[in-house]
Image (cartoon, rainbow, N blue to C red):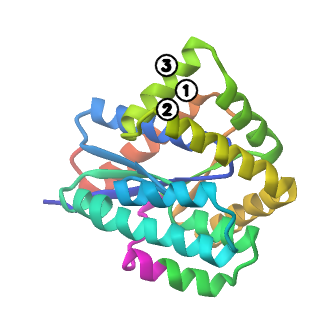
Amino acid sequence: MNRGLFITLEGPEGAGKSLQTARLCEALESRGIPCTATREPGGSAAAEAIRSIVLNEKLPPLAEALLFLAARAVNVEHIIRPALDQGRVVLCDRFTDSTIAYQGYGLGLDLPMLRQMCGFATGGLEPDLTFLLDIPPELGIQRRYADNHSSSPSTKRERRRTADQLSLALSEEEARLREAARSRIEERGLSFHQRVRLGFLEEARLNPHRIRVVDATRPPDEITAALTDAVLEVLAKSRGHL
């Protein structure tokens, strides 16, 4: 059995990572390609509990990074590696690049130290391919706020489909955590999110073999089609039978 393909979706707030993760998984499975979708922080019960702590508590940058890494270690051990060993395509909404961008470039933690910590937490696992959904932070934050408060039936249906694909419960607790995340976004200010975006773009410059920058200001359907074509191309090259 071939090892699966590990793909991560990264980007600033409001870039549409969760939506595109769910849509891409759906597109692959409709073509008979087994796919597992997960997110960070989260994916398993323990990692979701850690996510709740991170969003509800004001933590020092290092403590925040360590909690994210603990959640990632659980996700890798319980979800990502087993799925890869089964030959599945694994899509993860955020991974190590987010730690580097947010806690490194954004909060100022030492980048070499963070890279070592990320490698330790994942046991050296790295994505085969990363899509960086790039969007100016002003637009992304505005979009994120609008999505969280939209009452349109189409938006609610899309959000529910995304949640189902990522195995997330649209409960009152999840809604509360989303509001806590929005508060954290506003609290850190625009300059923080600008540093995060520049950090993502710098990582893309340093890792052109792995990270593909995608214009996330385009219509969602257009982005989904582009991501699907890119993944099918990679699978065809790596497996030679698609």
The residue tagged 3 is: 157
What amino acid is labelled 2 in the image?
Ala
**Which corner quadrant of the image does residue 99 belong to?**
bottom right
Q: Is residue 101 visible?
A: yes
What amino acid is labelled 1 in the image?
Asp
The residue tagged 1 is: 221
Instruction: Please rate how many residues cluster around mark 1, counting C-alpha atoms within 10 Å: few if below 14, some from 14 to 19, many from 20.
Output: few
Q: Comparing marks 3 and 1, which lies closer to the viewer?
A: 3
For this rendering, which residue is in front, 141 or 216? 141
**Which corner quadrant of the image does residue 63 belong to?**
bottom right
The outermost residue toward the left is 1
Q: Position of residue 68 (x, y in %)?
A: 52, 67
User: Where the N terminus falls, by quadrant?
Assistant: bottom left
- Mark 3 and mark 2: Cα distance apart in space: 20 Å
Q: Which residues are magenta?
A: 119-129
Residues at discs 1 and 2 in contact (Cβ within 8 Å): yes
Report whether 187 appears left or right of 73: right
